[in-house]
C-alpha cells in the first residue's frame, strides 16, 4: 500500500519518568488511505490516544521521545519543522477531542474560535471567514447558526459542543481527521447523530479518519479497518468483517466475550478478561498480554519470555501471538464463537 | 408483598431567581411521578439519557434525598418521611454503590476502615471482630485481605469498585442501588464487576436497582427495565419484552441508537432531533412530544397515563405500537 495517505512506520513514543521509561507506544505500523476509516481499539493505557497526539505532533515540547516515521502525504511529521507542522495542523489534519468543554477556549465565542482557525491558514477577510464558519455550523447540524455563532461554549449543550468542535476540525477540509473518543461522553441518541454526521462528511470530503474508541459497537458502525492495541503495541489488525467474524488474538476474544449484547441474551455469565491492564512502566516480559491469557498452553514458544512478532495469520489479517494461526482459528470456532 | 414499592415518586429541586427580593422560581422536576415495585432478589434496570432523573430517583428511593411527593414502602413499611434513628435502621437494609470509584472512597482512610465504616456507624459488632469481618468481605469481592491497610489510590479502578461493593454488602442489606457501577471501568474489567454483582445477588438474595446508560449492560443484568425521560416513566417491562417488543417511541429510539458490534448489520435507526428540553420547563402534555417522531396535537394537551398494555408491560404513550429495532 504505497499510495496510502498516512503511513505510520514503527512509531515509538517513550516518556522518561522518575519511575522508569514509559513505553506508551512501542513500534506501531499502519497505513490509511483517503476516504477510509481506521478504528483503533484498546483499554485505557493501551497507547491509542498517545498515538493520535504523536500524529498531530502534540508531544513536541514535552519530554516524550518520538521516533519512527509518520508520513502524511509523503511528508515525515516526526522530523518536520515546528513551523511547517503548524501549517499542516488544522489544514491538512485535524483532531476531535473527547471533551469539547476543555478543548475549546471558554473566554472566546464559538465564532471567534472558528474564524481564527480559518484565518490562520487562509488570507480571507473576517466577514468571509465568519460566513464560512456559519455555513460550517449549519452543516454539522447546529440550528440557527447565525445566532449560535456568537455564543460561548458553555451556552451549548454537550452534543452541540461536540458538533461545534467537529465544525472547527473540519473548517479547512482536512484530509486526515483524528477523532479521539468523540462520542464517549455523549448519550447514545446524540452519539448516533454524531456518527451519522461523521459518515456524511467523509462521503462529502473524502477525508481519511482515525477513530479511537473503546466501544466495539462504534467500530463496527464506522470503521473500514480495525487495529487493536494492548500495552502500547498493536496486537491485531484487519479489515472490519474479519475483526468481528474471525478475530484472531486472545485479547480481542476477551473483549468480545466480556461485552454484554444489546440484541440478544448471552450465556448467563459474561466471560471477563482476568486480571488488570498492565502498567506501562513495568510491562510483563514477553507477550504483554500473557498474564491475562488463558490459552498459553497452546503456544509454541514461551509467552513469558519471547515477545511475539506481528505476523499474518491469514491474508489481510495480522496478529501478535505465539499460538499457531491454524490452532487459533480452531480455538475461535470451537470455544469463542459459540459464546459471542 | 414486594420488597420495595414506589408510588408516584416526585423530587423537585427549588430554583431561585435573582430579583429585587429573592424569590423562588419554577422548580426543576427531576423526578415527576415514577412508580415501580421490586421483589426480593430481583433487579430493576433504570435507563435513560443524562438528565432524565434516573440517579435522582435512585437516591430518593434510598432517602439520600427527601422526596417532594409520593410514597416509598420498604418491606410493607412506609419510609417516605422517616427520620433519625428510624432512618438509620433503614440504612442497614438499603445500600448504594456509586459510579465514581475515585470520588466515593475517602482517600485518607485505609480500605479496612472504609469497609468497616458501616459496622461502626450502625454499632454492630460482627462475630469474630470487625477486622475478621472486613477481611472476609474483601476476600468475598476478590480483593487480597492482606491489603487491609492500603489506601484507595493503591488500587486500580476495578478494584476500587470492588471495595465499594464490599462496603455496600457489609451489613447484608436487602436492597442495593447501583448507580452506574461499571461505566467508569474498562470493558474487560466491567464484566468482572458485573459477574461479582450477580454472584452476590444469588448468594444473599439481594434486590438491585441498577442505574446505567449502557443498554447492553442493563439487558444482561436486569429482570425488568424502566425507561425514564425528563423525570417521567416512559415504559417499564420485563427485560426481554422491553428489548424485543418496545412499544414507546422513546424506548425504540434509544435502542435503535445503540451500535451493535456486528458490522454491516442492517438496522432501522430512529434519529431523535433536537436536545433534551429543560426539566424546569418541560413540554406540556407528553414530555417526549418535542422529539417524538409520531407526536400529534393530542400529545401536546393530554398527558399520557402509564397503562398496562400487556401483562407487566406498562407504557405511557397515546400511540403505543410494537416495533422491532434491534
Image: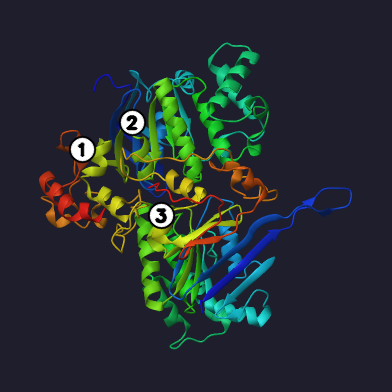
Q: Which mark is residue A67?
A: 2
Q: Which residue is mark 3?
A: B243
Q: CA distance from mark 2 to mark 1?
A: 23 Å
**Residue farthest along the right direction in this orientation:** B20
Few, some or many residues within 10 Å of mark 2 (<14, 14–19, 20+): some
How many numbered marks appear? Answer: 3
Give the number of the mark in front: 2 or 1: 1
Q: Secondary structure at mark 3?
A: helix
Letter of the chain that mark 3 sits on in the rendering = B
Tell me, yes or no, whether dots 2 and 1 are on the same chain: yes
Please tell me which residue lies in front, B70 or B188.
B70
Please tell me which residue lies in front, B186 or A263.
A263
Few, some or many residues within 10 Å of mark 1 (<14, 14–19, 20+): many
- Horizontal relation, residue A337 to residue A281: left or right: left
Tell me where residue B102 appears, x and y as whole percent: 51, 58
Q: Which residue is mark 1?
A: A318
Please tell me which residue lies in front, B21 or B137.
B21
Residue ID at (64%, 59%)? B32
Quadrant into which the N terminus of chain A falls: top left
Tell me if I can see residue B156 in this picture.
no
Give the number of the mark in front: 3 or 1: 3
Amino acid at each position: 500500500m504505497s499510495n496510502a495517505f498516512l503511513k505510520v512506520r514503527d512509531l515509538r513514543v517513550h516518556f522518561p519518568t522518575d519511575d522508569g521509561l514509559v513505553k506508551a507506544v512501542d513500534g506501531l505500523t499502519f497505513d490509511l488511505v483517503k476516504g477510509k476509516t481506521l478504528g483503533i481499539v484498546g483499554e485505557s493505557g493501551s497507547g491509542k490516544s498517545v498515538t493520535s497526539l504523536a500524529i498531530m505532533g502534540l508531544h513536541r515540547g514535552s519530554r516524550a521521545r518520538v521516533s519512527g516515521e509518520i508520513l502524511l502525504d509523503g511528508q515525515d511529521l516526526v522530523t518536520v519543522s515546528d513551523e511547517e507542522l503548524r501549517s499542516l495542523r488544522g489544514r491538512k489534519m485535524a483532531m476531535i477531542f473527547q471533551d469539547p468543554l476543555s478543548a475549546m477556549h471558554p473566554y472566546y465565542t464559538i465564532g471567534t474560535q472558528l474564524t481564527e482557525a480559518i484565518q490562520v491558514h487562509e488570507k480571507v477577510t473576517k466577514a468571509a471567514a465568519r460566513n464560512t464558519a456559519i455555513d460550517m455550523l449549519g452543516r454539522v447540524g447546529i440550528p440557527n447558526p447565525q445566532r449560535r455563532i456568537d455564543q460561548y461554549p458553555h451556552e451549548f449543550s454537550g452534543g452541540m459542543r461536540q458538533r461545534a468542535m467537529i465544525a472547527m476540525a473540519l473548517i479547512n477540509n482536512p484530509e486526515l481527521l483524528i477523532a479521539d473518543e468523540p462520542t464517549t461522553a455523549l448519550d447514545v441518541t446524540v452519539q448516533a447523530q454524531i456518527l451519522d454526521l461523521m459518515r456524511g462528511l467523509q462521503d462529502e470530503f473524502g477525508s481519511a479518519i482515525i477513530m479511537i474508541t473503546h466501544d466495539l459497537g462504534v467500530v463496527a458502525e464506522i470503521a473500514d479497518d480495525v487495529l487493536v492495541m494492548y500495552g502500547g503495541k498493536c496486537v491485531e489488525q484487519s479489515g472490519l468483517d474479519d475483526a468481528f467474524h474471525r478475530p484472531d488474538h486472545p485479547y480481542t476474544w476477551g473483549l468480545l466475550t466480556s461485552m454484554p449484547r444489546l440484541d440478544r441474551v448471552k450465556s448467563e455469565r459474561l466471560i471477563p478478561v482476568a486480571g488488570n491492564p498492565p502498567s506501562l512502566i513495568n510491562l510483563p516480559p514477553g507477550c504483554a498480554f500473557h498474564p491475562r491469557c488463558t490459552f498459553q498452553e497452546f503456544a509454541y514458544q514461551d509467552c513469558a519470555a519471547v515477545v511475539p512478532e506481528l505476523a499474518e495469520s491469514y491474508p489481510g489479517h495480522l496478529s501478535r501471538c505465539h499460538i499457531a494461526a491454524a490452532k487459533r482459528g480452531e480455538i475461535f470456532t470451537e470455544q469463542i464463537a459459540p459464546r459471542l | 408483598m414486594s420488597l420495595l414499592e414506589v408510588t408516584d415518586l416526585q423530587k423537585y429541586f427549588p430554583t431561585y431567581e435573582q430579583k429585587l427580593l429573592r424569590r423562588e422560581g419554577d422548580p426543576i422536576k427531576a423526578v415527576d411521578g415514577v412508580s415501580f415495585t421490586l421483589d426480593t432478589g430481583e433487579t430493576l434496570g433504570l435507563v435513560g439519557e443524562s438528565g432524565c432523573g434516573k440517579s435522582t430517583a435512585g437516591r430518593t428511593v434510598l432517602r439520600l434525598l427527601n422526596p417532594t411527593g409520593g410514597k416509598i414502602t420498604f418491606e410493607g413499611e412506609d419510609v417516605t418521611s422517616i427520620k433519625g434513628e428510624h432512618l438509620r435502621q433503614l440504612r442497614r437494609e438499603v445500600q448504594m454503590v456509586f459510579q465514581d470509584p475515585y470520588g466515593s472512597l475517602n482517600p485518607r482512610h485505609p480500605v479496612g476502615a472504609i469497609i468497616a465504616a458501616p459496622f461502626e456507624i450502625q454499632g454492630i459488632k460482627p462475630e469474630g471482630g470487625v477486622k475478621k469481618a472486613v477481611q472476609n468481605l474483601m476476600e468475598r469481592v476478590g480483593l487480597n485481605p492482606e491489603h487491609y491497610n492500603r489506601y484507595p489510590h493503591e488500587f486500580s479502578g476495578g478494584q476500587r469498585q470492588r471495595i465499594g461493593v464490599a462496603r455496600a454488602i457489609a451489613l447484608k442489606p436487602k436492597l442495593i442501588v447501583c448507580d452506574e457501577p461499571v461505566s467508569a471501568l474498562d470493558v474487560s474489567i466491567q464484566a468482572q464487576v458485573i459477574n461479582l454483582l450477580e454472584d452476590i445477588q444469588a448468594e444473599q438474595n439481594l434486590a438491585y436497582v441498577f442505574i446505567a446508560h449502557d443498554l447492553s449492560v442493563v439487558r444482561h443484568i436486569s429482570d425488568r427495565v424502566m425507561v425514564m425521560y425528563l423525570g417521567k416513566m416512559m415504559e417499564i417491562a420485563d427485560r426481554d419484552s422491553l428489548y424485543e417488543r418496545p412499544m414507546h417511541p422513546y424506548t425504540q429510539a434509544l435502542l435503535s441508537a445503540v451500535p451493535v458490534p456486528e458490522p454491516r448489520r442492517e438496522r432501522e435507526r430512529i434519529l431523535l432531533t433536537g436536545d433534551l428540553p429543560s426539566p424546569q420547563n418541560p413540554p406540556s402534555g407528553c414530555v417526549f412530544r418535542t422529539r417524538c417522531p409520531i407526536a400529534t396535537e393530542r400529545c401536546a394537551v393530554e398527558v399520557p397515563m402509564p397503562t398496562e398494555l400487556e401483562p407487566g408491560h406498562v407504557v405511557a404513550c397515546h400511540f403505543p405500537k410494537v416495533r422491532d429495532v434491534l
